[in-house]
Amino acid sequence: MGTHQSGKGPRRHQRLGFKTLITPAKVNVKAHLAELGRIIRSSRAWPQAALIRQLNPKIRGWANYYRTWVSQATFSRVDHLTWVKLRHWARRRHPNASAGWVYDRYWPRWDSRRVFATPATAEGQVYLTSHREVPSLWHAKVAGNRSPYDGDWVYWSTRRGRDPTVGPRLATLLKRQGGRCAYCGLFFQHDDQLEVDHISGHRRDSRYSNLQALHEHCHDAKTREHGEYLPVGLRDKHQGAEERSARKRARSVLEQR
């Protein structure tokens, strides 16, 4: 890299002479485009649906392999070059039709954009997957000298969403909450007692949208606050009494002012 485009070391004091951003090699990009072009040329007499079914596995596999790299600019360029190849394929099938008719025929509107797809009226409609649809996978730096064998199951569950010593439900909640308690907002420690709480108080609703990870004492405080230890009828009366007492305290504060 040059003097002004070089990557920098810790605290940006030292120029490294290179960048740590890894992009797909030009040779691999060229080989992938050649493979797509070979499929498109060999399918000149195929139906559009058959061509799409041949291209989609190639596109998904290649994009998923490079999703951990800095590949979005490369994905956009490959999508454009693939569109050029498909445009030539479509124009060759209808030499006497206008370019606008061909574009409307093979690139119908899909939500808010145009995609290479079969007509919506066709049975079993299929559309071409683009490289940009595959989301990038970014890896965060491991903090300090941590190791998967250090026994800190909270950190590794929060980072990976799974851990051999933790149940999959709790590990998923830890990753979703960023390692924080949903009640007090403090970070979990590896020696804390954790519990899975039902947000609505309905214990039969075990969807992830109704679950949260709490400290044991935070879970007890939430249970007392919402009266979840009571039957449904008494719970409603308890919550109504709590709301009335809160309003009464608010009125008394206003009167004192």
Image: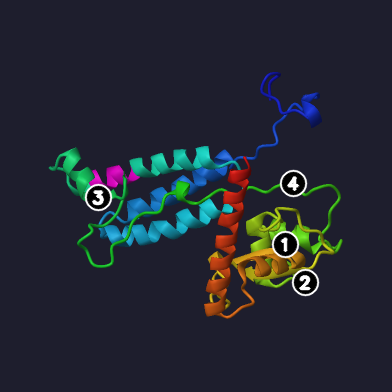
Quarter that holds the N terminus = top right
> Nearer the N terminus, badge 3 or badge 4?
3
Q: Say which mark, if any, is on residue 141.
A: 4
Q: Amino acid at mark 2?
A: Thr
Instruction: Indicate the colouring scheme.
Output: rainbow
Q: Is residue 256 left or right of residue 96?
A: right
Query: Is-magenta flag for residue 77?
Result: no
Marks 4 and 2, Cα distance to the nearest angstrom?
22 Å
Q: Is residue 216 left or right of residue 125?
A: right
Q: Amino acid at mark 1?
A: Ser
Q: Which residue is mark 3?
A: 106
Q: What residue is shown at x 34% (from left), y 40% (from top)?
A: 84
Give the residues drawn in magenta, as a range. Answer: 85-91
Q: Main secondary structure of the magenta part?
A: helix
- Comparing labels 3 and 2, the label whose residue is closer to the camera: 2
Q: Amino acid at mark 3?
A: Tyr
Marks 3 and 1, Cα distance to the nearest angstrom?
46 Å
- Choose between 39 and 198: the one closer to the eye: 198
Mark 4 and mark 2 in contact? Answer it, CB < 8 Å. no
Q: Say which mark, if any, is on residue 165.
A: 2
Q: Amino acid at mark 4?
A: Lys
Q: Say which mark, if any, is on residue 157.
A: 1
Q: What residue is shown at x 23% (from left), y 43% (from top)?
A: 103
Crowd rating for badge 1 (residues with CA inside 10 Å; few <14, some 14–19, many 20+): many
> Nearer the N terminus, badge 3 or badge 2?
3
Count of residue discs: 4
Mark 2 and mark 1 in contact? Answer it, CB < 8 Å. no
Quarter that holds the C terminus = top right
